Amino acid sequence: MEGFDAGWIDAGDRRRAYYTHLPGGQYRFVVETGRNGVWSGATAGGSILLRPPFYRTPLFLLLGIAVLLTVIVAWGLSERRPS
């Protein structure tokens, strides 16, 4: 997986590739076939765009800061009000 793995991964007899915990980003999955230790030299692949979950975006961070500031200001105003 270009953009994630440092080099080729020998999958052995497996016909599936599993990637867990991939961060958001753009990747290219490339496959090369071989038999008995002799590689074909031909590759096939496809591009993958993985968007990060909403809670890992700048917008979520800004919303969290806005909510935190709102709570702090509301708490501060409630402490100043005479009983």
Image (spheres, rainbow, N blue to C red):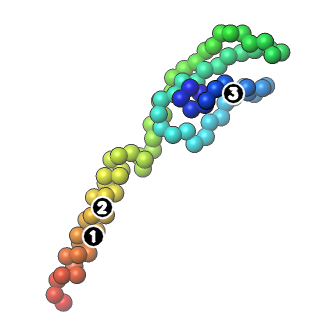
- Crowding at dot 3, Cα within 10 Å, few <14 / some 14-19 / many 20+, comes out as few
User: In the picture shown, does residue 10 fall above or below 72?
Assistant: above
Depth check, mark 2 against mark 1: the one in front is 1
Q: Could you say whether the residue bearing mark 1 is in a helix, strand or loop?
A: helix
Q: Which residue is mark 3?
A: 9
Question: Residue 70 sits in which quadrant?
Answer: bottom left
Q: Residues within 10 Å of mark 1 (few under 14, many from 20)?
A: few
Dots 2, 1 in contact, CB < 8 A: no
Q: CA distance from mark 2 to mark 3?
A: 45 Å
Check disc 2 and report the residue beneath it.
67
Reading the image, the residue beneath label 1 is 72
Q: How many marks?
A: 3
Please state which of the two labelled residues, at mark 1 or mark 3, is closer to the viewer: 3
Residue drawn at x 72%, y 10% is 40
Q: Is residue 64 left or right of residue 82?
A: right
Residue farthest to the left, as pictured: 82
Sequence-wise, the earlier of marks 2 and 1 is 2
C-alpha span from label 2 to label 1 = 9 Å
Q: Amino acid at mark 2?
A: Val
Who's the residue at 69% across and 27% down the image? 9
| Quadrant of the snapshot with the C terminus | bottom left
Which residue type carries mark 1? Ile
